[in-house]
Amino acid sequence: MGIHKGGDTDCQVCEALDLPVAEIEIGGDDEWITVDDLGGRPLCHLQLVKGGKMIVTIEHLEQAQACREAIETFRVLFWGPVEVTEENLKKAQEAGLDLNWWIQHCVPEILEAYLAQRQPLFEAYLAQRRPLLEAYEAQIQPLWAAYEAEVRRLILTLLQGG
């Protein structure tokens, strides 16, 4: 299985969906585009499939120069082309794949909107996290101080031959 190069080979996406070479549905039932309609931009890179859904393949990650560890994690987790769904995004996150990296390198057409809309979510997370960390630090401090005191006593005891 190859990757579209001007529409001369089948790609994993098209094979998996039994679509003709260089044709992927992007909207309604009658809306089709080809590599030529995109000025030669590979359809694989767009990751579009039937009904406007997205699919990701190992080839996409390789084209985006993902690290070997991420490609292997993806391969083990999904073993082939996978539709981008909430469930699959969660599986990817839980397996340690970096969705921020994926957006930046594989779906740059939504990057600006993603970053702008993610920012308030991240700020809300930080605002809720701050008091939890402060409470944790306040609770851990006496425990750490007691541990350090015991370590000092242990060192002195061992140095005194005990």
Image (cartoon, grey):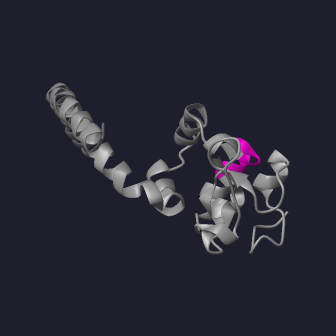
Residue 129: percent from the left, percent from the top?
Answer: 23, 32
**Left or right: 64 as drawn, with respect to 23:** left
Which is nearer the eye, 41 or 37?
Answer: 37
Residue at (62, 63) in percent of width and height = 45
> Which image quadrant: the N terminus?
bottom right
Q: Nearer the viewer, residue 127 or 27?
A: 27
Q: Give the main secondary structure of the magenta stretch.
A: helix
Query: Where does residue 46 sit, x and y in percent of width and height?
Result: 61, 59
Q: Which residues are magenta?
A: 73-81
Q: Determine the residue positioned at 67% across, 49% down.
A: 31
What is the total number of numbered labels drawn onto the structure image?
0
Residue located at (54% from left, 60% from top): 106
Where is residue 110 shown, x and y percent of the image? 43, 54
Quarter where residue 68 is shown: bottom right
Residue 30 seen in render? yes
Q: Is residue 87 above or below residue 78?
A: above
Q: Is residue 12 magenta?
A: no
